[in-house]
């Protein structure tokens, strides 16, 4: 049996194979998941016209579901066409039962009308909403959101969906007349990975092509596949958007014919990824780039010790590191200020070691540190303009492609990616990237050094360094080593920097 994650698609079959189950299968395979199908209808359509929906009997839907439950249990269910009220009721019962007993995510792409015209579902909207409380993510376009909620304003539409119990609402802007295509994302709760309310837009230039039949189904199944692969919701949505851009771009300029959306491979081309617009990006979008790390050509940062006291700083400064971070936790304000001041003084004797201060950006400015390191959750409370004006370098933590793209737009001096492995230094539950995602993020990087952090031991460091990352940040690999000097030398030997 395959060890790939399984998703189900409960959707209609399109005989022209552009949309519905055919699109879901191709998309799922592009993202490395197994896709099982429960076919709600045999639809008759082509690129010019929609002819007929032949809805599947409830008994057959139930047979398919029971067969799959026996040995193809899903991590995520993607729902598309629900052809009538009977099917909506059957779906309500299925989801109610499954969600009561299992941790399954449900993504729903409402399908009411065919793009070529023609009603696909006779399900009464008020009745269909019965199964909405079991949906985690809904992906309507603007007009679908309007038809379902009766609201024209996207914030009100999102609120209406949230009131029905859906935690994440993505209103797709692909059908708008603008030059850009902006999807608005509302994360309403923290039950699927993100913390609290988070509203953001993913925006891309419009791609000129009519090969988009099945694009909506493909977006939702890409989100489902990414969730099944363990990505956070915001990363799943970002990857799905890049996948759609990539597929549209494959048929750029083809305007004569309404063609099938082309499912290509897992997206790695940075040009296909959207711009992230949220309140952090809006607040700081006008800032000039932060100063670079003044490395000479071909010089790498190498090992980056992150340490929690002046004592550790005194021990490590003589060991020839290009960069060190003072990360003070659980200390009084007076101690913190005294230690930052002292750290900056000590570092003056080691001009090749760049001293970064974690979190305390005002004190870093006041005492003239080389740079500051800021976590994503602290970005909104940090005056990045003040850091920029003061000429301090800036490092930003990122966890996944959404945060990576967002932070990269701020043009910091370096980006950190974590946690690469589970770590006992900090709770990073749900945010473990692995070497594969690190490699993927490196393919999206602009000309900004990338630091890997989290659970990197001497044994794991070679596989991380082989990704081509510019630096490896470590806490316990040095501070808990039986011989920190020896551990530092071994780590430096792995990177070939500072030996
Ligand atoms: C190089 C590097 N990367 C990530 C972090 C984590 O910073 P942050 O998100 O601010 O979390 P805390 O360090 O405050 O726990 C870091 N310090 N250094
Ligand atoms: C401080 C920190 N930040 C992380 C992030 O992913 O942002 S992981 C991490 C802990 C790093 O410690 P160790 O090397 O002992 O695993």
Image: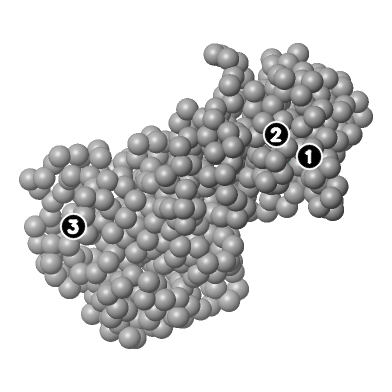
Secondary structure beneath disc 3? loop
Q: Which residue is mark 2?
A: 369
- Residue 284 in percent (x, y) is at 47, 48
**Residue 323 placement, left or right of 119:** right
Name the disc covering residue 221, or none: none
Q: Earlier in the sequence, mark 1 or mark 3?
A: 3
The answer to whether residue 41 is above or below residue 457 is below
Labels 2 & 3 near each other (Cβ < 8 A):
no
> Relative to the observer, which residue lies in front, 116 or 281?
281
- Residue at (29, 64) in percent of width and height: 141
- Residue 417 in percent (x, y) is at 60, 39
> Relative to the observer, which residue lies in front, 382 or 480?
382
**Residue 243 falls in which quadrant of the image?**
top left
Name the disc covering residue 177, or none: 3
**Residue 322 placement, left or right of 269:** right
Labels 2 & 1 near each other (Cβ < 8 A):
yes
């Amino acid at each position: 049996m395959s060890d790939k994650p399984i998703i189900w698609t409960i959707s209609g079959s399109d005989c022209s194979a552009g949309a519905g189950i055919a699109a879901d299968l191709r998309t799922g395979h592009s993202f490395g998941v197994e896709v099982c199908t429960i076919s709600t209808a045999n639809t008759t359509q082509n690129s010019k016209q929609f002819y007929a929906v032949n809805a599947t009997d409830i008994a057959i839907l139930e047979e398919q579901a029971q067969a799959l439950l026996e040995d193809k249990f899903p991590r995520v269910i993607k729902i598309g066409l629900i052809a009538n009220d009977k099917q909506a009721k059957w779906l309500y019962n299925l989801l109610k039962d499954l969600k009561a007993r299992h941790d399954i995510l449900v993504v729903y792409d409402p399908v009411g009308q065919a793009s070529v015209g023609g009603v696909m579902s006779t399900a009464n909207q008020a009745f269909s909403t019965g199964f909405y409380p079991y949906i985690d993510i809904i992906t309507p376009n603007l007009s679908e959101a309007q038809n379902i909620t009766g609201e024209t304003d996207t914030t009100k539409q999102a609120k209406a969906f949230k009131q029905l119990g859906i935690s994440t609402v993505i209103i797709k802007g692909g059908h708008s007349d603008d030059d850009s295509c902006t999807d608005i994302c509302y994360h309403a709760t923290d039950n699927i990975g993100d913390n609290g309310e988070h509203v953001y837009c993913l925006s891309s230039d419009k791609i000129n092509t009519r090969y988009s039949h099945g694009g909506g189904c493909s977006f939702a199944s890409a989100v489902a596949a990414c969730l099944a692969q363990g990505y956070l919701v915001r990363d799943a949505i970002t990857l799905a958007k890049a996948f759609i851009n990539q597929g549209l771009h494959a048929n750029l300029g083809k305007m004569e014919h309404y063609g099938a959306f082309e499912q290509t491979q897992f997206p790695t081309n940075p040009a296909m990824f959207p711009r992230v617009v949220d309140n952090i990006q809006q607040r700081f979008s006008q800032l000039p780039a932060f100063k670079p790390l003044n490395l000479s050509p071909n010089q790498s940062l190498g090992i980056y010790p992150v340490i929690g006291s002046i004592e550790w700083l005194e021990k490590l400064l003589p060991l020839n590191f290009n960069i060190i971070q003072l990360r003070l936790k659980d200390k009084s304000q007076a101690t913190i200020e005294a230690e930052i001041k002292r750290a900056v003084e000590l570092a003056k004797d080691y001009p090749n070691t760049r001293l970064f201060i974690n979190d305390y950006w005002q004190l870093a400015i006041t005492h003239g540190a080389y740079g500051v390191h800021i976590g994503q959750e602290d970005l909104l409370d940090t005056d990045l303009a003040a850091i920029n004006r003061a000429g301090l370098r800036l490092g930003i933590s990122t966890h996944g492609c959404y945060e990576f793209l967002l932070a990269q737009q701020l043009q910091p001096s370096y980006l950190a990616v974590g946690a690469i492995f589970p770590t006992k230094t900090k709770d990073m539950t749900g945010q473990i990237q692995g070497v594969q995602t690190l490699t993927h993020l490196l393919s999206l990087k602009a000309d900004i050094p990338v630091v890997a952090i989290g659970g990197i031991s001497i044994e794991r460091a070679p596989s991380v360094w082989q990704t081509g990352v510019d630096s490896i940040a470590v806490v316990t690999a040095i501070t808990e080593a039986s011989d920190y000097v020896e551990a530092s030398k071994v780590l430096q030997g792995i990177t070939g920097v500072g030996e």
